Image (cartoon, coloured by chain):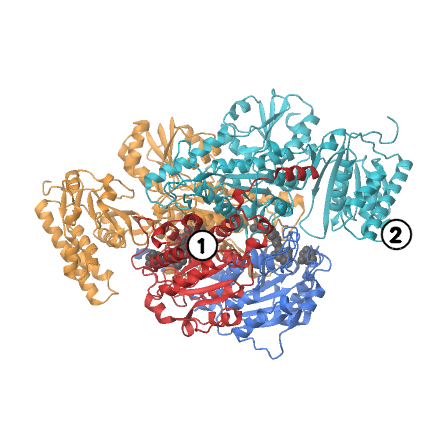
Chain colours: A red, B cyan, C orange, D blue
């Protein structure tokens, strides 16, 4: 399929010129096209933020919900209709801040969905406060003395939660990003891709160049099935060297959520196609 | 009829009381079924503390030859299963109360207040059979005997009930009930305490459900196939009910990490074509209110079961109240329409819960079902629900290429598409959006979208469930009530016995009927009965009709109204 | 006076419009200060889209010889900084509007509609100086010239403003403003467009603040030393304001992970003796409502700043509205008292925010400050706030050994202890509790505790801030309004010019004054003006007084009322 | 100090006879007594649940807040008055379920407080649903087919977040528990102690005996300053052997929150003792 298939035509995109979000959109379209995902079968779920506007810029079904709440909605969409391709995509503030609790517990469920997080280490839409991933010392109008908190390490946390697919990419490397996107989307189960993305308007520290200088690919012989190795790599932060990018961890022993619950064990049809079982209901009522 | 001291009775209330973990609830579960099988109308309600062991809980079971669905203060028969039990129900005792108790529970004061108290050494008998835990089953036998229930029915029932257990457990339980029956019989012969109640053949065809089971059955009848919920008393029953029947009815049951996830799951599920409910109580509902607003903006159907308990904050987690009407009315920022049901009895709970799913689907609005701890935990016998009378109305369409989720139509309702069904794309947005669903800052369009959303409120008004006016169309005094208090008010008015007093019960509390004012204008005196301290429903009525209530009957100690409560108040107000 | 085409003007509105990132806000910040330094009354308000770059935003600056605090539609001078700008403000243009624009922004249609349009090649001039980004500073110079502002004032100001920057940046900015001034002067001479406004010496002693700064200063004056908040437009300003001054005033400023944390932090902080505020907007406030209920139960002081924006859900994040009154009124499950302020101008914002902390501390209740996007973003000049008139009232006690946090006192207020201050222990519980603060299931005590909590509501009624009746005590028509619309209504009534029309503005919206009914009864016609679609405040008034409003003036397109809006509506209604 | 100092006298304790909560209460009193923490200077903060009732049974200042929300309150109490000893204590459902987002982000702040979590792998007070730590297959009235989700591993997650003190104990070993409690309380910064505790009423699987059989102390030569080793130990679950107990990880390079913010840099007095600076305020107002 051609990536143009996902184009929205003449629309006004609210991102700043030069923002990494544009590349993410482009790469995502290409990945989807190469995987032949039909727009009618794709649901993009997002929260609120600059990143969270992405579903509006890609021809597909859209659930653009509340700030921080994309994952529970995406989970429910996926488990109400496992035939859909579900991508939950939002910003670092949305997913790891407001949505932190869903981030943790959704991983535990392992639904068959892809979770793309635009990690620009800042709150873009609300004009430049620290996000959970902001680096120590990062100054903002709220963090006037610079960020004092330990930056949230989504990759390490996801590995600690034994997520079934954990990756980080830098959008500056588009081919690599596309490749990881494709693997994430085809992965059966929950797949996290933390996407390092420069915010040209509010993050003057972690720029394109900075990311370029401070990231490197995981070693070529790296084995993503080892949780211990994955954690060791995840702990490598820019505070003490370069942050690795690539697929840190996969656990292929896990079934996706919908294969575990009884609802789809004998019948794979989505819930909307089903009818109430009148006989059983009559029987049940009479049992009381 | 002279046959015994007590003679034939129409309506007896049996109370069991003991600390948590003493098996009060087991006795309740056994007795209600036994009474029903014996052909009696039965009603059982409980009050309990927020703890797993200890404290003091009680169950009131009414057994009757006529339908009964209301709580009474009066205790006809009391079985204290614990030392503190008699004190716990102290104020409900009368000279006529029959107490069957361990010898050492009965001090002189008790004996004086209740001359009809008899000693039964439940624990010793139970120990003799094998374990003191059987004492509650012994009590079941004693009660069975007093009510003259066929002993075969008792033993058969116990045998069936414990059929999954090991043989010696079954045998010992049977022995316990038999021994109890024997003792009960002896007591009856010695003291003429038999309570002969006439069975009603109608009862055989009826079912016995508690409030939350009625809601649960209504949900399944309404096509519910998804629940996102986080445990919270007293709402958890719906989650466990649907979990129990998940496999049979193809229901996705997910215990959410918190209530916020619960409600967002429910909205996501509806988006994908499921029929979802979120179930919670006050504090959890407070957390859901942003999600309620999302449903308002996305024009997503949403059903929320809100089982009320006293607040604020954690309040009294296992008690009852009607304090969250305002919260349900105004939950969520911004402005959007909604509907709120508050069933008064199991039949209404079944009907309205099923209706909630259809209404939500049709008008694409949040619909709330307000119950309370009293209602969800109370058992009623009732004619079997007729699910065939309830259609599952899907109200979604196959989308075409040019599909626009928020198309502005004449009546404000846009055809609802489902992703994956049809060629169209379904775009739902929490921002203000255009007809296609995409984010907009066109401020004229904003106004049209607000108008579109609010116009559905008028449609909901037209679809309103009328309140129940009972018993007479002519009245001087009108008592307004809503939710679970219906049967209590009905019995209280019957007992009060004046034919110029009627009640107007609202099983739908929002919107209110357009012509409500006319009905209220007929009353000389309007009384409003509510389980809260501020008269929330009266405010709503006043806003809607301009008529303010004359008198209030409010209760907010965590317990439900009783028939006696209401009668006494009516006497004071209009007696 | 014949000196120029325009002559001496009392009140001129200057509008700058361009896409986000074009420096509209920089011009605003520069011009308001320059005008004020020149001795003019100044008012500036903006409307903008929810995006960081692109889109179309505008700023309206009114410059006057008399105090002005209201938004007008009318544009006297327009400087479009972007191609789409003229179209964006299209409906506000009149034949008298002076447009200063890049040559290619001015097409024939514009020239026809606004004959007074002049070409200024801002970008080219800026480029010549060094960078096209300077074009907005050129515009500042042009405007300065038109208003006849002393050129030294302009250059001094610019020099100071950019003093932190590199020397060439300072120099180029100064060159830009000087060049602009030169061009402006030429235009004035050629076209007689000078606007000579008489300065008012009073302005010199005044301060220039926007709404959120007034709230922030009020908070510091009220002793605020803790903020727990999560960024959300339009409430974020308070968080950044307090962050900016945290070091100076010893304020713990913590950006919470979510709004739930924010409000629970605020309550925890009060418990430990801090004076805390949570700041948020609609959706965030919805998430805080469980915490609000906690404050109700714990009888914890709590101050919440709720900056309204249009909903439901994400709605229009950068627009204005008054849609969250009901939410604030009924937020939280269960029943407990609260107070709600809605300041109408900076002075009220300062006073009431400070008062919120004292009131919360004294009555141990949640107090809300309702602002909106319009108010927080709008600049006003106003007499300097007198902080010495505001005492920080601590209202806590040193505890003794026998201290009981929830002691039942005559007026319902228990002395508030702080852990670590005194020998007593401070026990606060979200469950229903006894006087010592420990969890209880004593249901009689429950009733006493409910009564105790609710009785504080009556004290709050007595402490109410009276609404402002303006200008006349005698009236036939009374216009009710609340919150940020006060100055707009005031100017509209003055313009409308009938002395039988008064306004009644509520800076405290809950509770309402006990005797409000009497005031309302004097009116033949009552009109209610609100920034929502359903008339939420009118409902509250009706509930409180039994009087319903005759006419509504509602606006809900995301923009604030303008003086012209209101005058036109008044004319239609009572003209 | 004598542990009796914390006794409440004749009170009705709502726990079930035989519940592990009693031992936790006892051990905590002892630990506090041995550390000489004055009741007037101690604030116990909890949420809602059986575990969360503990502050009512110990003579001290109490903030018994909302379900899941003890940590933000505790954080604020601690940062409003750093002289107080603050213990946030609740159940596994409360801390890791409803409160999961606060659990994560509070760790990032590293406030000087102790976080004690009664981990009975079940929701006690609401009568026996799965908690985030419930083991796979655990059957309840809601999880009728047994728990399907990956159990939440609080120790691994805390280490992934680089918490400054991370421990797990089994209340069956009281001396060890007391020792760890004492170290946690004296630790300067955030200290997590996950306490394995049998629930005799609703968890018939993870009983006292089960915990005894399925736990073992960390090796005697174990070095808690290595994050990698800590993670490796944290990944050892009962699914593949014994769960280690002990102090997994300490990071002593971190300052507690209140030492990082300007408010206490020149003045260590609690906020309630401070007065508004009238002169500065006047100055500030005039600056506008
Ligand atoms: C409940 C709630 N709280 C706060 C907000 C305000 N808000 C909108 S976007 C955003 C942060 C966005 O940051 P991020 O997710 O990192 O996305 P980015 O803009 O950086 O792409 C916030 C705080 C909101 N919309 N809803
Ligand atoms: C907002 C909210 N949701 C749900 C509840 C109901 N609730 C009370 S305690 C509890 C779970 C307790 O489990 P845990 O924290 O593990 O403590 P335990 O009882 O096992 O000690 C729940 C769900 C509540 N009180 N508030
Ligand atoms: S604010 Fe930052 S993240 Fe948002 S669009 Fe602009 S550059 Fe991108
Ligand atoms: S329910 Fe479980 S955790 Fe709660 S007190 Fe009883 S045994 Fe302990
Ligand atoms: Mg971001
Ligand atoms: Mg637990």
Q: On the image, numbered disc 2 is attached to which residue?
A: B128
Residue C92 location, x and y as percent? 24, 40
Would the CB of label 2 be found within 8 Å of ligand 4? no
Left or right position of C166 against C474: left
As drawn, the residue found furthest toward the bottom would be D221
Quarter of the image where one finds residue C422:
bottom right
Any part of residue B535 in sight:
no
Which chain letter goes with mark 2?
B
C274 over C470 or under it: above or below: below
Where is the C terminus of chain B found, in terms of image quarters? top right
Left or right position of C236 against B565: left
Which residue is more in the foreground, D242 or D114?
Answer: D242
C420 over C143 or under it: above or below: below
Which chain letter goes with mark 1?
A
Tell me the crowding category of disc 1: few under 14, some 14 to 19, or many 20 or more residues within 10 angstroms, Cα based.
many
B113 over A263 or under it: above or below: above
As drawn, the residue found furthest toward the top would be B474
Where is the N terminus of chain B found, in terms of image quarters? top right
Whole-number angstrom distance, CA of label 2 to CA of label 1: 65 Å
Tell me the crowding category of disc 2: few under 14, some 14 to 19, or many 20 or more residues within 10 angstroms, Cα based.
few
Label for residue A87? 1
The quarter of the rendering in which ligand 6 is drawn is bottom right
B76 over D269 or under it: above or below: above
């Amino acid at each position: 399929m051609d990536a143009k298939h996902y184009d929205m035509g003449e629309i006004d995109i609210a991102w700043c010129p030069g923002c990494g979000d544009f590349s993410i959109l482009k790469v995502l379209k290409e990945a989807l096209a190469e995987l032949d995902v039909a727009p009618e079968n794709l649901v993009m779920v997002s929260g609120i933020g600059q990143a969270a506007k992405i579903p509006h810029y890609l021809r597909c079904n859209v659930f653009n919900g509340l700030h921080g709440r994309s994952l529970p909605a995406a989970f429910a969409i996926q488990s109400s209709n496992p035939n859909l391709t579900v991508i939950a995509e939002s910003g670092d503030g949305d997913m790891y801040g407001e949505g932190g609790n869903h981030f943790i517990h959704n991983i535990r469920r392992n639904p068959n969905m892809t979770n793309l997080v635009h990690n620009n280490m800042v709150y873009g839409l609300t004009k430049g406060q620290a996000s959970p991933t902001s680096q120590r010392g990062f100054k903002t109008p709220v963090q006037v003395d610079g960020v004092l908190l330990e930056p949230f390490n989504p990759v390490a946390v996801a590995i600690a939660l034994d997520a079934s697919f954990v990756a980080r990419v830098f959008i500056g490397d588009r081919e690599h990003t596309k490749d990881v996107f494709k693997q994430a989307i085809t992965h059966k189960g929950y797949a996290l891709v933390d996407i390092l993305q420069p915010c040209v308007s509010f993050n003057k520290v972690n720029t394109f160049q900075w990311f370029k200088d401070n990231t490197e690919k995981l070693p070529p012989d790296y084995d993503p099935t080892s949780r211990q190795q994955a954690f060791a790599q995840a702990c490598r932060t820019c505070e003490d060297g370069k942050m690795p990018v690539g697929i840190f961890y996969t656990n292929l022993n896990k079934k996706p959520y919908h294969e575990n619950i009884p609802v789809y064990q004998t019948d794979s049809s989505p819930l909307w196609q089903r009818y109430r079982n009148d006989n059983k209901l009559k029987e049940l009522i009479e049992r009381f | 009829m002279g046959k015994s001291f007590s003679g034939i009775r129409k309506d007896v209330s049996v109370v069991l009381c003991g600390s948590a973990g003493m098996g009060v609830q087991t006795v309740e579960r056994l007795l209600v079924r036994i009474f029903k099988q014996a052909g009696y109308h039965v009603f059982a309600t409980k009050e309990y503390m927020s703890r797993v062991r200890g404290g003091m809980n009680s169950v009131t079971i009414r057994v009757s030859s006529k339908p009964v669905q209301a709580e009474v203060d009066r205790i006809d028969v009391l079985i204290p299963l614990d030392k503190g039990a008699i004190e716990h129900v102290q104020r409900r005792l009368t000279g006529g109360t029959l107490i069957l108790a361990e010898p050492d529970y009965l001090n002189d004061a008790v004996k004086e207040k209740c001359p009809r108290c008899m000693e039964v050494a439940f624990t010793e008998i139970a120990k003799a059979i094998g374990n003191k835990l059987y004492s509650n089953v012994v009590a079941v036998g004693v009660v069975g005997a007093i009510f003259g229930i066929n002993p075969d029915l008792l033993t058969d029932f116990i045998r069936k009930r414990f059929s999954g257990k090991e043989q010696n457990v079954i045998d010992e339980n049977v022995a316990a009930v038999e021994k109890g029956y024997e003792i009960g019989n002896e007591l009856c012969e010695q003291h003429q305490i038999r309570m002969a109640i006439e069975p009603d053949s109608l009862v055989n065809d009826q079912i016995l459900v508690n409030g939350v089971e009625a809601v649960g059955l209504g949900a399944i009848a309404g096509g519910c196939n998804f629940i996102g919920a986080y445990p919270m008393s007293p709402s958890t029953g719906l989650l466990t009910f649907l979990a129990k029947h998940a496999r049979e009815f193809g229901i996705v049951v997910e215990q959410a990490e918190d209530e916020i996830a619960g409600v967002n799951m429910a909205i996501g599920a509806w988006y994908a074509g499921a029929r979802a409910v979120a179930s919670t109580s006050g504090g959890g509902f407070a957390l859901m209110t942003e999600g309620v607003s999302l449903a308002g903006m996305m024009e997503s159907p949403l059903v929320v079961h809100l089982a009320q308990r006293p607040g604020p904050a954690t309040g009294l987690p296992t008690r009852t109240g009607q304090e969250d009407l305002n919260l349900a009315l105004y939950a969520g920022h911004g402005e959007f329409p909604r509907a709120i049901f508050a069933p008064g009895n199991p039949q209404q709970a079944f009907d309205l819960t099923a209706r909630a799913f259809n209404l939500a689907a049709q008008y694409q609005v949040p619909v709330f079902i307000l119950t309370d701890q009293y209602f969800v935990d109370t058992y009623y016998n009732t004619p079997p629900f007729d699910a065939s009378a309830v259609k599952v109305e899907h109200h979604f369409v196959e989308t075409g290429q040019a599909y626009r989720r928020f198309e502005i139509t004449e009546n404000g309702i846009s055809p609802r598409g489902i992703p994956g069904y049809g060629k169209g794309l379904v775009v739902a947005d929490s921002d203000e959006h255009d007809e296609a669903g995409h984010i907009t800052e066109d401020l004229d369009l904003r106004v049209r979208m607000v108008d579109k959303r609010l116009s559905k409120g008028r449609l909901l008004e037209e679809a309103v469930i009328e309140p129940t006016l009972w018993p007479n169309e002519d009245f001087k005094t009108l008592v307004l009530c809503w939710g679970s208090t219906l049967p209590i008010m009905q019995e209280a008015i019957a007992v009060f016995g004046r034919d110029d007093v009627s009640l107007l019960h609202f099983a739908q509390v929002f919107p209110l009927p357009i012509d409500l004012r006319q009905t209220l204008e007929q009353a000389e005196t309007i009384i409003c009965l509510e389980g809260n301290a501020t008269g929330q429903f009266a405010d709503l009525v006043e806003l809607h009709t301009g008529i303010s209530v004359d008198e209030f009957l409010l209760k907010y100690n965590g317990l439900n109204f009783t028939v006696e409560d209401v009668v006494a108040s009516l006497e004071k107000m209009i007696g």
